[in-house]
Image: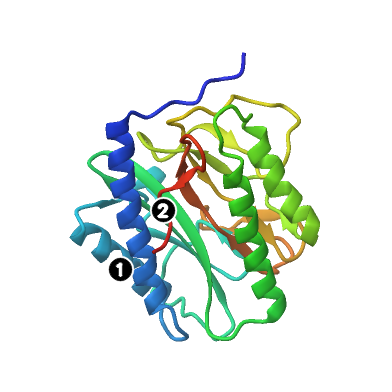
């Protein structure tokens, strides 16, 4: 029997919604600060200050030993980039910002890849396609749908544009813990997996590369990079399955 995905109570979803609101606001604060010349550590400090002021706790700081509030990944860095004072954003970069927030013990998680100043058109198209895949995956989060429909929808968008697909990482359940079962592939597995039910809360997170699929982990044992050193993009939302359209909790407003 396929595993059943944990269903959150109304009270738990309410707290996840609050965590997600703080998370989205932290993203907007970071977005407002992104410009050539700012360091990735400064972005991290902005996010942490916002989260704590709003009554939340940075979910990533100390998680599995990660040292910061944000994962900040620049250009060929795919995920898990460590913020640094000497890592300065340059005109034409793209920067992926991944942020998690805890509110009263419940977790939310989301990521956005932002352009820094004027970016090459082919890179902007990569960002748009990855966000399109995120929304395609979310559109499959309906009660009664098999989990693999999310994965297939993401893969279909990637194939449409011919980008590299990061296969080693993917989405996951979220709420009581930062990472819960099930793991959500960003490609069709051919196995239906568990059926979605009202109250399931999932983080959907496609990662597309401008070049090939292959990635590797840097010597810092955190930062994941594209093997061909071409840019990557990463988008993520925390979403709850409800009757009708899925509710995106981390929507930037």
Residue under label 1 = 45
Determine which of the numbered discs, if any, sits on residue 139 in the image.
Answer: none
Q: Which of 247 and 163 is in front in this view?
A: 247
Q: Which residue is drawn at 74% across and 55% down?
A: 158
Q: Which of 126 and 80 is in front in this view?
A: 126
Q: In the picture provided, is 224 more to the left or to the right than 60? A: right
Q: Which of marks 2 and 1 is nearer the N terminus?
A: 1
Q: Quadrant of residue 199?
A: top left
Q: Residue at x 57, y 74 (%)?
A: 94
For this orientation, the residue located farthest to the front is: 244
Q: In which quarter of the image is residue 201?
A: top left
Q: What element carries label 2?
A: loop
Q: Residues within 10 Å of mark 2 (few under 14, many from 20)?
A: many
Q: Is residue 214 above or below residue 118?
A: above
Q: Where is residue 224 in the image (x, y as percent from the top left)?
A: 59, 56
Q: Can residue 214 be seen in this view?
A: no
For this orientation, the residue located farthest to the top is: 1
Q: In the picture provided, is 219 more to the left or to the right than 174? A: right
Q: Is mark 1 on a helix, strand or loop?
A: helix
Q: In the picture provided, is 184 more to the left or to the right than 30? A: right
Q: Position of residue 113 (x, y in %)?
A: 54, 66
Q: Where is residue 50 in the image (x, y as percent from the top left)?
A: 26, 64
Residue under label 2 = 250
**Quarter of the figure with the C terminus:** bottom left
Q: Position of residue 24 (x, y in %)?
A: 37, 59
């Amino acid at each position: 029997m396929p595993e059943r995905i944990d269903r959150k109570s109304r009270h738990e979803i309410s707290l996840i919604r609050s965590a997600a609101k703080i998370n989205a606001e932290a993203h907007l604060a970071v977005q407002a600060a992104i410009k050539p010349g700012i360091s990735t550590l400064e972005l991290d400090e902005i996010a942490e200050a916002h989260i704590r002021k709003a009554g939340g706790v940075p979910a990533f700081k100390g998680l599995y030993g990660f040292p910061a509030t944000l994962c900040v990944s620049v250009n060929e860095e795919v995920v898990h980039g460590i913020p640094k004072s000497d890592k300065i954003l340059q005109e034409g970069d793209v920067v992926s910002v991944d942020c998690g927030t805890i509110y009263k013990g419940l977790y939310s998680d989301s990521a956005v890849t932002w352009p820094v100043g004027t970016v090459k058109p082919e890179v902007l198209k990569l960002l748009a396609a990855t966000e399109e895949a995120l929304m395609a995956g979310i559109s499959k989060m309906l009660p009664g749908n098999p989990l693999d429909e999310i994965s297939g929808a993401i893969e279909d968008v990637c194939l449409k544009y011919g980008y590299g697909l990061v296969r080693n990482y993917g989405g996951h359940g979220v709420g009581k813990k930062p990472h819960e079962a099930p793991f959500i592939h960003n490609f069709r597995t051919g196995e239906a997996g568990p059926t979605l039910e009202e109250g399931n809360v999932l983080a959907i997170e496609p990662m597309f590369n401008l070049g090939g699929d292959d990635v590797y982990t840097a010597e810092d044992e955190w930062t994941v990079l594209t093997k061909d050193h071409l840019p990557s993009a990463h988008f993520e939302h925390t979403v709850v399955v409800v009757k009708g359209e899925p509710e995106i909790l981390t929507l930037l407003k």
